[in-house]
Amino acid sequence: MWQWFHKLSTPKYYYQWSGKWLPWLAGLTIILFAIGLYWGLLVAPTDYQQGESYRIIYIHVPAAWMSMFVYVVMACAGFVALVWKTKLSEIVVSECAVIGAVFTAIALITGMLWGKPTWGTYWTWDARLTSELILLFLYFGVIAIYSSIEDKRVAAKAASMLAIVGVVNIPIIHFSVNWWNSLHQPNMDIISDKPSMDPSMLWPLLVMAVAFKVYFGWVLFMRIRNEIISRERATKWVKELVVGR
Amino acid sequence: MFSALITIIRRDLLVAFRRRAELMNPILFYVIVVTLFPLGVSPDKEFLSQLAPGVVWVTALLAALISMESIFRQDFDDGSVEQLFLSQHPPTVLILGKVIAHWLITGLPMLIIVPLMALLLYIPQQAIPTLFITVLIGTPILSLIGAIGVALTAGLRGGGVLLGLLVLPLYIPVLIFASGAVSAAITGLPYSGHVALLGAGLILALILAPLAISASLKISMS
């Protein structure tokens, strides 16, 4: 088992191993998205309070969940990168930062689009919105430091360090923002005032959540493979791979 | 180990006092930025005193940020940082010494200037002790967290803007609790909760930040 992990962390072996997984992940992503979107957008009943506009949660909520999940994945990979210094986990950190930032941006944009018809405004300094925005800034920080250091191995280590510092800080930020908000403008939290979700609405949401997870795996695998090819372009196996086809 | 800490603080203070002109810069920056707010927003007394806790603290974050660079930059370029790691003493202790020295140079003067700024922004008298306490507890946190960012960007040319991008989001809890405490004190509400949380933050930062700074410096040196 341990040996297998070690083997997996070598770029060449990972490239071959992940190649076998790609079609499965791609297929599963497409199937889950098809089911989830059809179920959520067409089959699930209309909300009696918010009407059709609530359906954006089938994108918004999974994206928001992923934005936090990806950060944790990134920090764990960063920890592995700093402790065991494996090349693969370094690549995972830099690729996760970009994917996570996009998920966060999707969550923010869909949230704003939903907020306009529901709250009557695109933006409010609600605790959730604010901490999501700060999360986006943290992702930007990781991306910025990774892209400004020339040596990509050093860059990945610096980005890992920042991701770990961020993970310690996220609960503190989240908690402080919550508290700051409750001090200034109470009773803004419309989401928690809503009655709990009906199963007919919840199931498609869960399908979408799984779809987003598998999609993340798929995109991550593809991005890692890309980065491996680009980093190892001087090695023999990559040259054979490219010329051989 | 303790004597090593004292030695490094004394050494950094000595280096700083040899370049006296630079010592005043963060404070002048602080005063000028605070002055911009009444000019840019409104000199109205009521309005300013409502805005003041935020202005004092946002400006403090910016002043801490721009003065942060000097903590490792020179030492990094001339190789002194490498010597820290070659020393027989744990690098975290020596790094803590450097942060303390840096805070004494940049944070402590702010402590003196802040009550004056409070007068400029019409913060009521009863809130000034609170402001003083938050600056006393809050600025060391800024120095500790900022040093992580500086350590990560030490090897880069022109890392100044990048530093802001990395460090400012991490400063947010300090801003919230510190300006929250001052706002509470102005309106006569209890503020000890905010101050206690700031204190907890300082303890956490004192324990964890030196580890992160030393790991970051090692990354930057590789």
Image (cartoon, coloured by chain):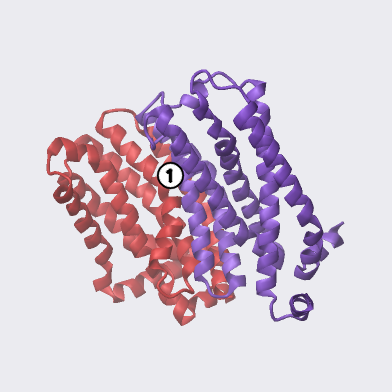
Chain colours: A purple, B red
Q: Relative to the observer, which residue lies in front, A58 or B70?
A: A58
Q: Relative to the observer, which residue lies in front, A233 or A168?
A: A233
Q: In which quarter of the image is the C terminus of chain B?
A: bottom right
Measuring from the top left, give residue A212's x and y in whole percent: 65, 43
- Name the image quarter holding residue A243: bottom right
Residue A176 versus residue A24 in the image, above or below: above
Residue A44 versus residue A71 in the image, above or below: above
Q: Which residue is drawn at 67% across and 35% down?
A: A36
Measuring from the top left, give residue B168's x and y in whole percent: 41, 54
Measuring from the top left, give residue A51's x and y in whole percent: 50, 23
The reply to whether residue B107 is in sight is no
Q: Relative to the observer, which residue lies in front, B94 or B168?
A: B168
Q: Is residue A102 left or right of residue A89?
A: left
Measuring from the top left, give residue B8's x and y in whole percent: 45, 70
Residue A7 versus residue B180 in the image, above or below: below
The reply to whether residue A41 is in sight is yes
Q: Which residue is drawn at 33% across and 41% down?
A: B179
Q: Which chain carries label 1?
A: B
Q: Relative to the observer, which residue lies in front, A10 or B169?
A: A10
Q: Is residue A80 left or right of residue B128?
A: right
Q: In which quarter of the image is the N terminus of chain B?
A: bottom right
Query: Element at badge 1?
Result: helix
Packing grade of label 1 (10 A; few <14, some 14-19, many >=20) is many
What residue type is disc 1 on? Pro
Task: From the image, tell me which residue sits under label 1.
Answer: B173
Q: Residue at x 54, y 69 (%)?
A: B217
Q: In this view, does A212 lie to the left or right of B82?
A: right
